[in-house]
Amino acid sequence: MSTIVVALVSGIIFGLGLCVSEMINPTRVIGFLDVFGRWDATLLLVMAAAVTVAGIGFPLVARRAKPIFADKFVVPKKTDIDLRLITGSVLFGVGWGLAGLCPGPAIAALASMSPPILMFVAAMIGGQWLASRFE
Amino acid sequence: MSEANVIGGLSGGAIIGLASVLLLLIGRITGISGILGGVVNWNATKDLSWRVAFIVGLILGAVLYRLFWGPLPLQLQAQGAMLVVAGILVGVGTRVGSGCTSGHGVCGVARRSTRSVIATLTFIGVAMLSVYVTRHAIA
């Protein structure tokens, strides 16, 4: 039960952060990606602040042998820089640049009930499902 | 250069970092494509509940913002078929590359994972190229 509550609260806080930072807005994101246009540094500031807070907080939480609300830490252990990592990141980058939407902001933007957002999220889920067929 | 949202960007980023630290209390990394991926392949995942809770929370966060702060800052940059193609690419890419802006870009970089740093530099660089091609080269 506590894992559900913590995950829900974490999701709410994350969603608020996306709105406050305006990263939910594709125009802000494209503004950052458009280095040859009117460049908008906001995304860089968001990442710097988020990485700083997580960089300080993660080691504090991970100092315990196991997490407070679970039996074990489930963190990625892979370290290899392989073709999958690069291919996937390239495909993601192309799509991200086309719409200015990545998974977090797209899901949070469902709150707008806007049909184009619903369409994007449906396509994204379809893409994930499709890729999982080849695993 | 467009006016950056300095205060909102820094405070919003800190809030995002805080949410990620909070999720580590249940032992999980805040990689949103991965959290969603576990729901998409729900039959292969035994830990569905926290994932659904996080995703519901994510939407709820934006709903709360709308209720207490003001309209969602949301101006789309693509429409129709372009939006569908973009969505498919984001879905396939984050699955194949095991992560997106949150998992690799925020959490992975914060954990000093070289793999995530490489992934982040790749997708940001390619996205910049993607924007250049669609908005300057062929537009």
Image: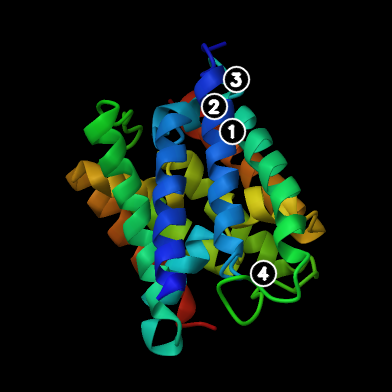
Residue B13 spot, x, y in % from top left: 57, 36
Residue linked to disc 1 = A46
Q: Which kind of residue does numbered mark 3 sit on?
A: Phe
Q: CA distance from mark 2 to mark 4?
A: 32 Å
Contact flag, marks 1 and 2 (Cβ < 8 Å): yes
**Marked residue chain, label 3:** A
Of residues A70 and B113, the one drawn nearer to the viewer in this rendering: A70
**Residue A32 visible here:** no
Distance (Cα) linking label 3 and label 1? 21 Å
Q: CA distance from mark 4 to mark 1?
A: 27 Å
Mark 3 secondary-structure assignment: loop
Q: Earlier in the sequence, mark 4 or mark 1?
A: 1
Classify residue A44 by image quadrant. top right
Residue A89 showing in the rendered view: yes
User: Which residue occupies 70% across, 50% down?
Assistant: A57
Instruction: Say which amino acid is labelled 2.
Output: Gly
The image shows residue B35 at horizontal and vertical percentages of 47, 67
Count neighbours of disc 3 (C-alpha within 10 A) and say few if under 14, some if 14 to 19, many if 20 or more.
some
Q: Are marks 3 and 4 in contact (CB under 8 Å)?
A: no
Which residue corresponds to mark 2? B9
